[in-house]
Amino acid sequence: MSTLYYDKVTKVMKVGAKKGVTLYGPKVKSLGTRTTKYLSKRIESATTMSVADVSIINENFGKYVTEYLKEGYIVDLGAMGDIRPKFDCKAVDTLEECDADSIRRISVQFKGSAELKEVVDNIKFEYRPGYTDTSANQDHAVTDGPTEPGGGTTPGGNTGGGGFSG
């Protein structure tokens, strides 16, 4: 079983019945980033391919996935799942109004495979604060995040996804 670490963060609600209220919730604590160079080295050690061979495959993989998404295809990523183009749109009153102007934002949607979902379902969670605050009880501490490029800070840091919606 894998362990996913989380930190505790604050969020001031901007809308709704709790507007202006500070709420607390867990957020995934990233252990860092694994680059394609790192992955290439790992794949090299598990295969007969060189890092250069794996890097060429990675570059072309990304190039073709992007190309197929732009054309409107769903791309099957095997045991990982699939990736597809997606957009948000404005609902309109008539069929005639339903056109490209209704599209608000285009994005990419990832849908994990059954195998990936099974792995994720078996993850346990452990609280690991981002920064040690010796003056606070760590079971209830909310930690400050690192300084972001541009000078600001974010509660809980730029620690990956999985925040809370309040």
Image (spheres, rainbow, N blue to C red):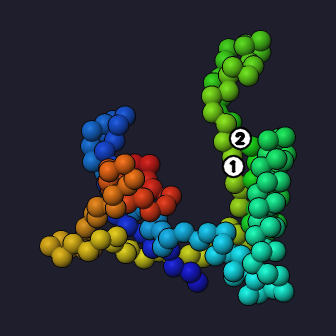
Q: Describe residue 27's horizontal placement relative to residue 36 as left or right.
A: left
Q: Total of numbered circles in the picture?
A: 2
**Amino acid type assigned to the residue bearing label 2 in the image:** Lys
Label 1 vs 2, first from the N-terminus: 2
* Residue 46 versus residue 79 in the image, above or below: below
Q: Nearer the viewer, residue 104 or 38?
A: 38
Residue tagged 2: 86
Q: Position of residue 28 (x, y in %)?
A: 46, 65
Q: Describe residue 53's horizontal placement relative to residue 109 as left or right.
A: right
* Quadrant of residue 130 within the rendered picture: bottom left
- Please name the residue shown 70% across and 69% down the image: 116
Q: Position of residue 40 (x, y in %)?
A: 71, 76
Q: Describe residue 121's horizontal placement relative to residue 32 as left or right.
A: right
Q: Position of residue 72 (x, y in %)?
A: 83, 41
Helix, strand or loop status at disc 2: strand
* Residue 45 versus residue 16 in the image, above or below: below
Residue tagged 1: 109
* Quadrant of residue 147 within the rendered picture: bottom left
* Residue 84 versus residue 50 in the image, above or below: above
- Please name the residue shown 71% across and 56% down the image: 111
Are the two marked residues, 1 and 2, in contact with CB atoms closer than 8 angstroms?
yes
Q: Describe residue 95's horizontal placement relative to residue 130 as left or right.
A: right
Q: Nearer the viewer, residue 61 or 81?
A: 61
